């Protein structure tokens, strides 16, 4: 409702909000800063046109792995700053949960390859990164919907990894109650998608992984608060 001026009683319009919310703006700035990181050849890592990448949550738990044949900065930014990727639109990946990014730029290893061989190499690289992060996962699972076909693991070049959440908002976003609420909402949205569409088995596996992630986080929170829970009681 518009407020009235105490002087003349004329209704005044509320001031228009311009630009991004502060937390969104600072995260985007951190992402942009990450992609200007120089590699050994002095090239911005975000400018590489081929690569694989992984996202991690606030516990440094891997949550998603992908590959790209477009600029790393463009592909990853589409995941994290808008809804124009299947993973985000289908509620497989919630950008809010991504605390760190790891990338493996691969231009130097695919230049000169035929289109077919290039795709085969990227598939192998993605599978290798996928297996690498799975070995570090407490749950032994990530949120990728599509099942990754087994490939021969290859030797990947050095990766670049960085937290994209600045210190000014990191503590608030890492708070377990905030994360539990967000995770529960994501599960509800994903379950709704599943109930309304003919979906893949992979999407149902993702729902299970999300539920396991929520259970683990909620259990940690209860333990942290010293609450005794006997799940055997009826």
Image: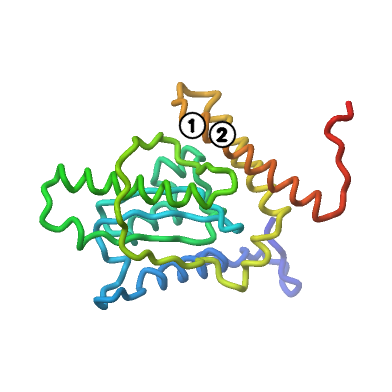
- Pick the front one: 52 or 94: 52
Res 10 quadrant in image? bottom right
**Vertical arrangement, residue 208 with respect to residue 143, above or below:** above
**Circle 1 sits on which residue?**
203
For the N terminus, give its image quadrant. Answer: bottom right
**Circle 2 sits on which residue?**
207
Residue 142, position as x, y percentages in the image: 50, 43
Residue 101 tag number: none
- Residue at 30 percent across and 72 percent down: it is 44
Disc 2 crowd, CA 10 A, few/some/many (<14, 14-19, 20+): many
- Pick the front one: 23 or 155: 155
For the C terminus, give its image quadrant. Answer: top right
Residue ranking furthest to the bottom: 42
Q: Are marks 2 and 1 in contact (CB under 8 Å)?
A: yes
**Vertical arrangement, residue 132 with respect to residue 73, above or below:** above
Residue 222, position as x, y percentages in the image: 80, 49
Badge 2 marks a residue whose secondary structure is: helix
- Residue at 45 percent across and 40 percent down: it is 144
Badge 1 marks a residue whose secondary structure is: helix
């Amino acid at each position: 409702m518009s407020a009235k001026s105490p002087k003349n009683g004329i209704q005044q319009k509320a001031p228009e909000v311009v630009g991004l919310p502060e937390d969104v703006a600072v995260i985007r700035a951190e992402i942009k800063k990450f992609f200007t990181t120089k590699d050994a050849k002095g090239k911005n890592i975000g400018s590489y046109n081929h690569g694989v990448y992984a996202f991690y949550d606030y516990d440094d738990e891997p949550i998603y792995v992908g590959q790209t044949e477009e600029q790393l900065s463009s592909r990853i930014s589409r995941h994290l700053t808008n809804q124009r990727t299947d993973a985000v639109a289908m509620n497989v990946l919630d950008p809010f949960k991504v605390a760190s990014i790891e990338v493996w730029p691969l231009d130097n290893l695919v230049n000169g390859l035929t289109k077919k061989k290039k795709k085969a190499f990227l598939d192998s690289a993605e599978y290798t990164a996928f297996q690498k992060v799975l070995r570090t996962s407490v749950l032994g699972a990530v949120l990728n919907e599509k099942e990754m076909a087994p490939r021969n693991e290859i030797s990947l070049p050095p990766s670049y990894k960085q937290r994209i959440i600045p210190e000014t908002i990191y503590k608030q976003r890492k708070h377990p109650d905030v994360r539990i609420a967000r995770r529960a909402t994501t599960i509800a949205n994903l379950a709704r998608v599943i109930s309304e569409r003919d979906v893949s088995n992979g999407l149902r596996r993702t729902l299970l992984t999300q539920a396991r992630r929520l259970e683990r986080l909620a259990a940690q929170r209860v333990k942290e608060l010293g609450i005794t829970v006997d799940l055997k009681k009826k």
